Image (cartoon, rainbow, N blue to C red):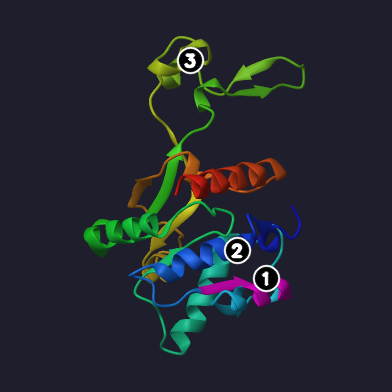
Amino acid sequence: MPGKNTKLLAGKPLIAWTIEEAKKSSFISQVIVNTDDEKIAEVSKKYGAEVFLRPPNLAGDLTEDLPVFTHHLEELKAIKDLPDIIVDLRATAPLRGVNRIDEGIQLLLNAGKEKADSVRAVSKAAKHPYKMWRMENSGFLNPLFREKETGIKEPYNAPRQILPALYQNNGAMNAFWPETVLEKKSMTGEKILGFEMEEWESVNIDTNIDFLVAEYIIRERQKAS
């Protein structure tokens, strides 16, 4: 979805939903949008965020998160403005509210640096991996997981109710210490606390269908409030 971050969702640019919730947080002192896009920068400033312009070499479609965050944090460290905690809020998760943001931050604070490197928001896997397949060149299906990995005979045919609960990243909220990125060279470190969120608040917008689902949920919640 080209331009999705500034596309109107229930009357506001998609990115505005995240900026507004972040600004309500009792923990977050700075809301910074890292972007190379002038329109995103303009909209972000309009809704009260600071803007950090990303260099072109870190703005490719295949650019990973780690070099982007490393560059940004090194710049902040150079001006002695390194934050105590980084809260990574993706614009594509507009349904997560400030209460969930603060819960995730509190989880990391309660654990401390010795017990946790990061907190990652997850939701129950929408499609269970035990029921996934590889398509061979021959056209035949090869199960991703077999009995030797799962302990379940033909896990792909098993009722979902007997399968173990598995989780997927939802992109709604990640929190970590600066040291996790700068010293451990990781977005998560090894000690990752899971923060489970409901399916409805975990909608992550990648397609037009996701956009329609998010808009429907927002409208229905507005009617109920």
Q: Disc 2, disc 1: CB below 8 Å?
A: yes
**Residue 33 is inside the magenta segment:** yes
Identified by mark 3, the residue type is Pro
Relative to the observer, which residue lies in front, 50 or 8? 8
Relative to the observer, which residue lies in front, 1 or 176? 1
Secondary element under disc 2, as helix, strand or loop, is: helix
Secondary element under disc 3, as helix, strand or loop, is: helix
Identified by mark 2, the residue type is Ile
- 144 w.r.t. 172: above or below: above
Counting residues from the N terminus, which is met first, the one under dot 3 or under dot 2? 2
Q: Disc 1, disc 3: CB below 8 Å?
A: no
The span shown in magenta is 32-43
Residue 117 visible, this orientation: no
Counting residues from the N terminus, which is met first, the one under dot 2 or under dot 1? 2
Identified at 28% across, 56% down, the residue is 107
With 108 as the anchor, is 40 left or right in this view? right
**Residue 212 image position (x, y, % from top left):** 66, 43
Give the numbered dot on residue 15.
2
Give the numbered dot on residue 40.
1
Counting residues from the N terminus, which is met first, the one under dot 1 or under dot 3? 1
Q: CA distance from mark 2 to mark 1?
A: 8 Å
- 171 w.r.t. 198: above or below: below
**Residue 211 image position (x, y, % from top left):** 66, 47
Q: Residues within 10 Å of mark 2 (few under 14, many from 20)?
A: many
Identified at 42% across, 40% down, the residue is 198
Q: Disc 3, disc 2: CB below 8 Å?
A: no
Q: Residues within 10 Å of mark 3 (few under 14, many from 20)?
A: many
**Residue 145 is inside the magenta segment:** no
Give the numbered dot on residue 155.
3
